Amino acid sequence: MAPWLLLLALLALLAGTGAESWEPETTELRGPARFALETLNREAGIRAVLRTVRGRVRRAGRGSLYSLKATLEEPPCNDPTVCQLPVSKKTLLCSFEVLEEMGKHMLLRRDCHPVDTRLPDDKNETISSALQLLNKESLSQDFSEKVASAFKDFVITYNRTYETKEEAQWRLTVFTTNLMRAQKIQALDRGTAQYGVTKFSDLTEEEFRTIYLNPLLKEEPSTKMRPAKSVGNSAPPEWDWRDKGAVTNVKDQGMCGSCWAFSVTGNVEGQWFLKQGALLSLSEQELLDCDKLDKGCMGGFPSSAYSAIKVLGGLETEEDYSYRGHLQTCSFSEGKAKVYINDSVELSRSEQKLAAWLAKNGPISVAINAFGMQFYRHGIAHPLRPLCSPWLIDHAVLLVGYGNRSGHPFWAIKNSWGADWGEQGYYYLHRGSGACGVNTMASSAVVD
């Protein structure tokens, strides 16, 4: 592709495509539109087909810049528990900019959105009113039956009980609304992740955030850490501390915003293993009860938790100080402490440097924006940056490894919502793009 033509195309994108009129579909427009579609399907992992296309062309020398507006449709899906809503036609509205020179194409820009469907907010909405918000012609005839069946399976799978018939009806409405939310998240994800029914599917977004997330992470931590010494940029192509015995089993924080404690104990467990050769499951409850710098189930900072461990004199094991998931009187005994730390360090925001540090020094405590995680089932999540802002982090987790699946680089993340969530309790997030702020609050304990 000639550099001057690419420059012209980029200038056209910045300045607008001029006054050329939008033309109806022609054979000339169909070619670059098919190229854009094939690129989208390959990169987004979908199977959309092209329906209509309009466009305009700016010509320069031997090349052409195509500005396209297209409608795409994805094939039907009839199982709401594993894929998007069972609609017979799921329409995407897309804008593409395609540069062509001597028969070769380059996709400069793509912007696709599903047809908008507003979701009910009112607690008094019923299942039928929620369904009416979708285009009636787009729904399969047995959609309501499928959702009712999926909800029944959900109740059985996760052992849900509701006190009244009204509560059960309300939870069914929330469940249905959440299926629609999961569909939108699915449509806008650029990775391979699948979203759908999870054990959190009967909770409203506000309930989920209040119970399981950590709003304090959006604020500036009061405890500052010294920067870690750089280990350079050289990192193996893949690494996983689970394969090397440095990671304990997935734990469950329960209905308590204590993710910060689990992130820190996971890091300390790995550091102790690497320095002392013993993998011990450490006590998060000790941090909930005895860390006076943080706020227990109301949230906390990893940096403060490291300081608390130093002040207390160490961590007891899970066996000696078991998890209860609510604040109790501190009963830490220094004589029972099995693990200590000497310091803590703040790590680089470069993901390449984080990978190199992880491979050499062990799992890393990080904080992320938990957008979409309420409905995450498996695969590599890659949300759009405006939807998963790095400035709105609200969940602390543990990086245990990294790698690549089918061209999608990922971080392997140990979560604290139990092994019945995600991929056996793990979350996989796109690596290399600062996705969801994964690189904004990375830290580790230091064990000498």
Image (tube, helix red, strand yellow):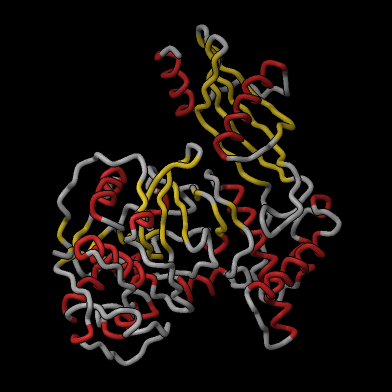
Classify 105 as above or below 325: above
Residue at 67% in and 66% down: 120
Closest to the observer: 381 or 58? 381
Give the image quarter of residue 127.
Answer: bottom right
**Residue 371, percent from left and from top:** 49, 59
From the viewer's perspective, tell me whether residue 273 is left or right of residue 138.
left
**Residue 274, percent from left and from top:** 23, 60
From the viewer's perspective, tell me whether residue 51 is left or right of residue 287.
right
Residue at 26% in and 73% down: 305
Residue at 39% in and 61% down: 393
Classify 263 as above or below 57: below
Closest to the observer: 130 or 357? 357
Query: Quarter holding the C terminus?
Result: bottom left
Give the image quarter of residue 215.
Answer: bottom left
From the viewer's perspective, tell me whether residue 51 is left or right of residue 364.
right
Residue at 80% in and 50% down: 138
Query: Quarter holding the N terminus?
Result: top left
Closest to the observer: 194 or 16? 194
**Residue 229, percent from left and from top:** 15, 51
Q: Residue furthest front?
A: 277
Closest to the observer: 381 or 22? 381
From the viewer's perspective, tell me whether residue 185 is left or right of residue 410.
right
